[in-house]
Amino acid sequence: MKNYALAYIVLFGLLSCSKEASPNVEVEEDAVFVDQGTSLYADNNTLNDVLFQAFWWDSFNDPKIGGYASFYAFLEDQIVALSNAHIDGIWMPPSSEGEGMGYHPRKLFDFNSQHGNKNELVSLLALMKSRKMHGMADLVINHRVGTDTWNDFTEPAWSCDAICMDDEGFTNPNAFGLVPCGDFDEGEGWGGARDLNHKSEEVQLGIKAYLAQLKALGFDSWRYDFVKGFPAKYVGEYNASTPYYLSVGEYWDGNPNALRSWIDKTSETLSENDTPKAAAFDFSIKYKLAEAVVQKKYSVLQANPSLAAIAGYGEKSITFLDNHDTGCINRNDCDNVFSKNTSELIQGYAYLLTHPGIPMVWGYHYFFSDSFGSLQKEINALIAIRKAFGVNANSKVVVVEAKDGASGYYVAQIDENLLVKIGSGAYVPDSQWKETRKALAYAVWEK
């Protein structure tokens, strides 16, 4: 097994700086990797999950994964270690053939992409399933590009009714190919590709067939790209068409109430039948954590800072620090990076992995952002703590204290048995708390 992600993987169990910190502790710093088998915490319950976004921008041709036949081959080589780290679900890049990363899909039903071929994808998903891990497909269904012209769709072939009539393919004099004849766009437009008309039965049936094919490949979870481009009721409709494990939308908004509103609107199909609400990426906590950790304004975390802090929405909140769009890796058109400072990243993950919501670890952070391996080691330790102490998407938080400034910190009690501090400032809890994990940027105590 090639040793990109494994160099600093620690053995299973709760990690600590002290062997006496907990009866569950097994200290194996810088241990040689040994497969511990399927995670003992795999329980098919989204409330207890930790997710992992496996890719970053242009990861398919990043020199850092050199030596592998494809990105899928690289990722397959990491699955056992990620399973041992108690990762439950893996968000995969767009799997259909398309431009570059696949965010301008061309042939939805062709699963040979820049990331690898269909056989490699099936093999990867089968390995994940054997480890009781969930594969999340990236659904880019707001827009498509044509095969030879702006809008000559193939695999599947769709008519002019599939394209919104106010799309650039109709309004731009330089466009060539099929003239759009669908309904007006119901959401935000996307200038780089043809906006799909979700009122069209042709589009609806095609997307439902697409989901069925993804299921047959081995995916069981959905990530909806750019959901501001079409009404939330279509997410409800598509979710209801195929059984799934977890569904999440990219509603890019830092306002937790806006996120909640979108989630609520996914609860019905087009025929107004009830269906389970989708989750949303919690951009609100990403931005609040940047204020707290990077700007040292820890007090912003005191009062309902995120979607996950709203009662009843912890299980609908996917918390994260960065992703392929915001992380500014291999691209120069983004300005939303959380941080590239290892200490600040550790603080961010210390918060996410000890707090409500369903936390997501970004693959670039985990594999490559810290050449010394300390970030990966702390993430593994924090996941182990989360699992061992039963922290979940709906855990209760009581903020104990928050102090701003370079020597500041944030301290909170999680449920009844954990105390967490992020920040470099000194904090000494009372005698009922026993140290479980301590690093320069954070500390965790158990009761």
Image (cartoon, helix red, strand yellow):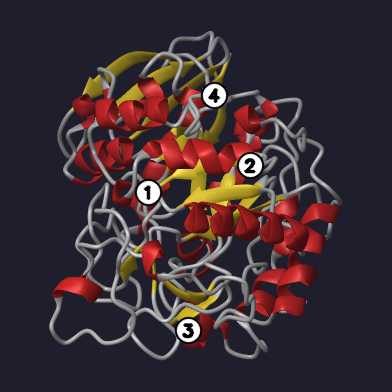
- What element does badge 2 sit on? helix
Q: Nearer the viewer, residue 180 or 311?
A: 180
Of residues 168 and 116, the one nearer the viewer is 168
As measured in the structure, the alpha-carbon distance from the residue carrying label 1 to the one carrying label 3 is 21 Å
Report if the CB atoms under discs 4 and 2 are less than 8 Å apart: no
Real-space Cα distance between discs 1 and 2? 31 Å
Where disc 4 sits, the SS reads loop
Measured in 3D between alpha carbons, the distance from the residue under mark 4 to the one under mark 2, in whole angstroms, is 12 Å
Q: CA distance from mark 3 to mark 2?
A: 36 Å
Residue at which label 4 appears: 273
Give the residue number, with chain letter if any, for mark 1: 321
User: Which is nearer the N-term, disc 3 or disc 4?
Assistant: 3
Q: Is residue 180 visible?
A: yes
Tell me if mark 1 has few (under 14), some (14-19) or many (20+) residues whose alpha carbon lies within 10 angstroms of its own: many
- Judge whether 124 appears above or below 14 on screen: below
C-alpha gap between disc 1 and disc 4: 35 Å
User: Can you tell which of label 3 and label 2 is closer to the viewer?
Assistant: 2
What amino acid is labelled 1 in the image?
A: Leu
User: Which mark's residue is nearer the viewer, 1 or 4?
Assistant: 4
- In the rendered image of this protein, does residue 256 appear above or below residue 209? above
Which image quadrant for residue 13? Answer: top right
Earlier residue among tags 4 and 2: 2
Of callouts 1 and 4, the N-terminal one? 4
Q: Position of residue 405 (x, y in %)?
A: 15, 35
Q: Which residue is mark 3?
A: 62
- Asked which secondary structure carries label 1, the reply is loop
What is the three-letter code of the residue carrying label 3? Asp
